[in-house]
Image (tube, rainbow, N blue to C red):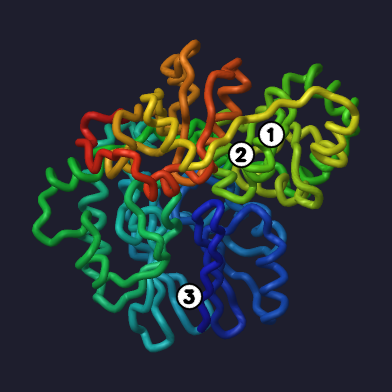
Amino acid sequence: MTIEQIYTGCLAQGAYYITSNGEAAIIDPLREIEPYIERAKKDNVQIKYIFETHFHADFVSGHIDLAKATGATIVYGPNAAPTYDVHVATDGEILKMGDISFKILHTPGHTMESTCFLLIDENGKDHSLFSGDTLFIGDVGRPDLAQKAASMTQEQLAGTLFHSLRDKVMTLADDVIVYPAHGAGSSCGKNMSKETVSTIGEQKAKNYALRADMSEEEFIKEVTDGLLPPPGYFGMNVMMNKTGYDNIGDVMKRANQALSPSAFEAAANETGAVVLDTRNAQVFSEGFIPNSINIGLDGQFAPWVGAMLPDVKQELLLVTEAGNEAETIKRLARVGYDHVIGFLDGGFDAWKNSGNEVDTVTRITADEFAERFKAAPIVIDVRKPGEFAAEHVDGAKSIPLDFINEDMAQFPKEEPFIIHCAGGYRSMIAASILKSRGYDNFIEVFGGFSAIAKTDVPKTDYVCPSTLRKA
């Protein structure tokens, strides 16, 4: 038996490849399926099962195409009702694969079809739990995403999750390995660890939501406290996973259109497409196409695209570093953004060399910020509320990037201001959006709060999270 976690950092997502005696299972695969097929060929195994822990909201799974390509059976837990052929397993059902088995543990709460898969090894021993979004390392799945589909409140879903964890998960042996679907950075939880593997025993000892003396009321309060609104694209990804989608190969071919600067400009003017610039924040700041939005490929690209551009059907025109065109299109397709019109042939240099108009963002260092801070400027922190609560520049205003489209009016139109995040990635996203909305009265801090923290700028160590914006 072999178990391999295939972790995709930009999505903070873990898929799993398991083999035993000539057969294989894939759990929560990404949309591009060729790596799984090639790996199975290399290992001379037949993919028998594709296990889906639930209808994912934050990415488009490859389950449908993988089943078509391999003949494998897609398996969901109880309550799942997709529009394509699947095996909807019953709670407690055992599915054999090679010399091992998978036991179906229905664990509703994150969603009502959420299911964990317990791997039972060759000796009949409970070995590992593929916990999906039910149990993370240091956290549990947020209970607010399925309210509409389940006709339940987030408190009712949280109560359901409480019992799923106590009745199904916490009863397992302490040495059972936990393999979750996500790690830190995912919007499917709020307090996930950077670690991506643990054990039941370790989680019972360290995970706030698995405290042995925790009442259901305490669980509901703590799990629902401080939840940020989910990204707008989540519901659309759920529907794609539930009802189907275009083959990613077809999506890639449609999007692979190299456009000259004149054709690129014409497409932008005629279609209303968003110009998405995926270059590094520093490179972007030095010159970019006016009104383009910067979301760097070197960060948590796909989730931030989903948060800033909530409609997956939004047409897109791409500006990338040379050679990154296909990678960008693939990462967009992973989260359902299938409507890329094309990319700028020759990148930004081609645009600039054609004599077209360019824009810039003024960046300053943390030391320059410290000097300017003496004049008491308006400082806007675009980090998440929890980051701001832990420590922030004295007097700074919290406007999280997550809410920037709704909170644009909170940015001063006339007075100059300074924006920053933790390191510069998110604040450049914010800067590009501000520029596209006509703001020119701001500067941005290179290195963000990580660099500011090393200066003598006064800081506030803590502010009660209840004073910050909540869902």
Helix, strand or loop status at disc 1? strand
Classify the position of the C terminus by image quarter: top left
Q: Specify the quadrant of the image occupied by residue 392.
A: top left
Q: Please report whichever mark, 3 or 1, sits nearer to the chain's N-terminal start.
A: 3
Q: CA distance from mark 2 to mark 1?
A: 7 Å
- How dense is the environment of label 2, judged by Cα within 10 Å: few (below 14), some, or many (20 and up)? many
Q: Is residue 95 above or below residue 228?
A: below
Helix, strand or loop status at disc 3? strand
Q: CA distance from mark 3 to mark 1?
A: 46 Å
Q: Going 57% across and 85% down the picture, which residue do you hit?
A: 21
User: For this rendering, which residue is in front, 169 or 270?
Assistant: 270
Kind of residue at disc 3: Lys
- Do the CB atoms of the residues marked 2 and 3 lie less than 8 Å apart? no
Q: CA distance from mark 2 to mark 3?
A: 44 Å
- Judge from the rendering whether residue 374 lies leftward or rightward of residue 275; answer left or right: left
- How dense is the environment of label 1, judged by Cα within 10 Å: few (below 14), some, or many (20 and up)? many
| Marker disc for residue 84 | none
| Marker disc for residue 276 | 1
- Do the CB atoms of the residues marked 2 and 1 lie less than 8 Å apart? yes
| Marker disc for residue 96 | 3
Q: Please report whichever mark, 2 or 1, sits nearer to the chain's N-terminal start.
A: 1
Where is mark 2, residue-wise? Answer: 295
Can residue 156 be seen here?
no
Marks 3 and 1: which is nearer the front? Answer: 1
Task: Locate residue 372, reporting x and y percent.
Answer: 44, 30
Marks 2 and 3: which is nearer the front? Answer: 2
Kind of residue at disc 2: Ile
Helix, strand or loop status at disc 2? loop
- Judge from the rendering whether residue 227 lies leftward or rightward of residue 369; answer left or right: left
